[in-house]
Image: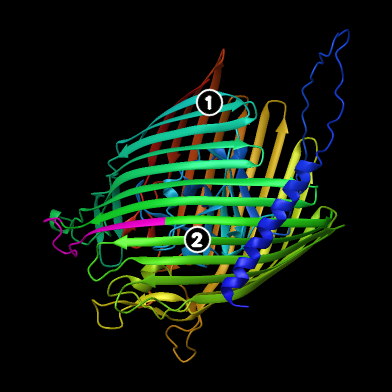
Amino acid sequence: MNKCNYYLLAILATVLAFAVTASASAQNPQPLPDLPQGGGEKDSIRQLYEVTVAAKQPVRTIATSQTLSGADLQALSTTSVADALKYFSGVQIKDYGGLGGLKTINVRSLGAQHVGVYVDGIRITNAQNGTVDLGKFSLSSMESVSLYNANKLDYCQSASEYASGATVYLQTRRPTHDSLSVQLRNASFFTWMAKANGQFNWRGWQGFIDGEYCSSRGNYPFRYHSEYEDTVGKRANSDIRYGRIEAALFKGGFSSHIYYYDSERGCPGGIVRRLSDKYTNVGREWDRDFFVQASYQERFFKKLLFKANTKYTNEYLRYCTDYPENQNTARVNNHYRQQDAYGALCAAYMPWSWLSLSSSYDIRYSILKADLKRFDDVERVDQKLVFAAQMNWHNIQAAASALHQRYSDWTFANAGAAEPLDRWTPAVSLAYTFCDITLRCWYKEIFRAPTLNDLYYTQVGNRNLKPEYTKQLNFGAEYHWNDKHWAVDAQADIYQNKIENRIVCLPLKGTYTWSMMNYGYTFCRGLNATLKGHYQIKGWNFSLLTSLTWQKDVDRTDPDDEDMYNKPICYSPTFSSGITGIAGWRSLQFTTSYLYVGERMWSKADPEDILEPYHNVDMKLSYTHNIKKTLIGLCLEVCDVLDIQYEHLPRYPMPGRNYKLTLSFGI
């Protein structure tokens, strides 16, 4: 049976199962229970009493996960999703500095392209470069932010959710009542922000509209100190102006989301030793991102689950450095347009309450257009098929999956498209629970396909690239304890990652001509640990959130290369940790957080080139007050209290001490 017939059979089987069960459900409706009658009522009138049904979702501890939600999420000093994720263990955030700097996530040194980011269970995609700028997503409409090493394990989920080395889930809030809130913020470096959020709950329909506008000059002072230089100046051309509006609609198993983001920002580049107008980069970037998505899930006969996902994405990017002031920068004025259409069908069958069998088929069509010289439009069809099983029997949990991925590209370029990529990858998990303690282990193989930039970017792309192949092994333990006033959650995991055929960009044809290539074998072993504690008594609430990461990520490509063999991978710290304390009394809340990141090597050419360790302390004080039906809030945040000068990337200094003052109204 060829591949086309194979995929067609899987689709037809899923659709047929849904059609048969839906038809049976319609022909044999379940009788409704009798409702109690109001006393003394006559004729055929009945009093319909309100019924509230609540069910506690079982905790699935088989996956290694971390979650910030509810009050803890809102208490942190955060502006975007990237700010929240930095509090998780095993995470490195790459930040190019300032409000407008690109922000990406790296989990356990796998690389940003190995991390899938999902909004309400549907992935945010970028076929062009494979990364997601987390600074574009606000927390104002989020109920929770979760990080899963490997993948989340639900009874019915799409094949795409199995296809990443790590996954980030952004869960939007389902409103429980009508409300309207407005926020006004003034912050350092001439930053102004206005935000509005409206929510409704009407006849079973729930939804919200959330909008935000922000502008900032971003001209923060910095000091760059090294062995050979000591530079003091102000960041130039780091301004940003953006607007974001999104809305969601929910009812039962149906959910939908629409999102639009429009921005213009400066691209200041790395700082140079000599500061003058001549060396100021005045490049600019324009972004317009739009997506609309919908999902529907239904249960039949208590044993069959069906889920369908669909999404359309349209992204525009313009990058321009064609200005007279740029005397040491290549002059470009490039426009990129990317469209993406996605659909998924998922079905799960539970023959017994302790066993689930599921299958899902995903298909995604992407097209990239650009006005680069000698660049032709590129089309990609990405197909995924997964078969999975999960067991929850007494105190034993187990899961296994087999994922098939196929990538096919088309281009009219003279060199032609890359060869189709076709491969199966497995994953297995096992956990055992006793006395509030869960022991778990899991193993996962996965790969990430070369992006369209890797393969086809003018003068750099390499159509013969192989996928990066990753093998992950994890052993962990988790503990939960609750009583009347206390709640304690602790977990620790040791892990090992191996990556083969890592995709890198190297100068193979001279200093000014770089090429993408598969180079290297990396080996990483590490430890992640988190501890959460909550204490509540009378009007007081206390929370403690801690995280710790130790890892050693090394290059084991060539044993004969004494200079590089077993040396650390760039941007991978050996040790990092964080601790956050939250204290609340009635309407007053104080939060302080401390983050530490150890030294990181940033240049393979010279292992002595390192980024120094840094400490970061943030504080936040907030107060809310009710006046009849109006809620008024005031919040003061001080970020980088100690004014530590640090960098996530060399010569991209982060802002030092800065302030945010937020006034909010809600009805």
The magenta stretch is 323-339
For marks 2 and 1, the one nearer the N-term is: 2
Q: Amino acid at mark 1?
A: Tyr
Query: Percent x, y for residue 345?
Result: 62, 56
The residue nearer to you, when weighing 50 against 666, is 50
> Are the residues at dot 2 and dot 1 in contact (C-beta closer than 8 Å)?
no
Q: Vertically, is 328 above or below 176? A: below
The residue nearer to you, when weighing 196 against 535, is 196
Residue assigned mark 1: 623
What is the secondary structure assignment of the residue under circle 2?
Answer: strand
Query: Percent x, y for residue 480?
Result: 76, 49
| Quarter of the picture holding the N terminus | bottom right
Query: Percent x, y for residue 491?
Result: 70, 56
Q: Vertically, is 554 above or below 266? A: below
Horizontal side, residue 597 vs residue 167: left or right? left
Is residue 144 shown to the viewer in this render? yes
Q: Vertically, is 68 above or below 114? A: above
Q: Quadrant of residue 401?
A: bottom right
From the image, state whether disc 2 or disc 1 is nearer to you: 2
Marks 2 and 1 sit apart, C-alpha to C-alpha, by 46 Å
Q: Amino acid at mark 2?
A: Arg
Q: Is residue 534 magenta?
A: no
Question: Coloring scheme of the render?
Answer: rainbow
Q: Quadrant of residue 416?
A: bottom left
What is the secondary structure assignment of the residue under circle 1?
Answer: strand
| Residue found at the far bottom of this picture | 560
Query: Percent x, y for residue 497?
Result: 59, 73
| Residue at the (57%, 12%) spot, across then down | 628
Graded by Cα atoms within 10 Å as few (under 14), some (14 to 19) or many (20 or more), the crowding at tag 1 reads some
The residue nearer to you, when weighing 442 against 20, is 20
Residue assigned mark 2: 364
Q: Is residue 335 magenta?
A: yes
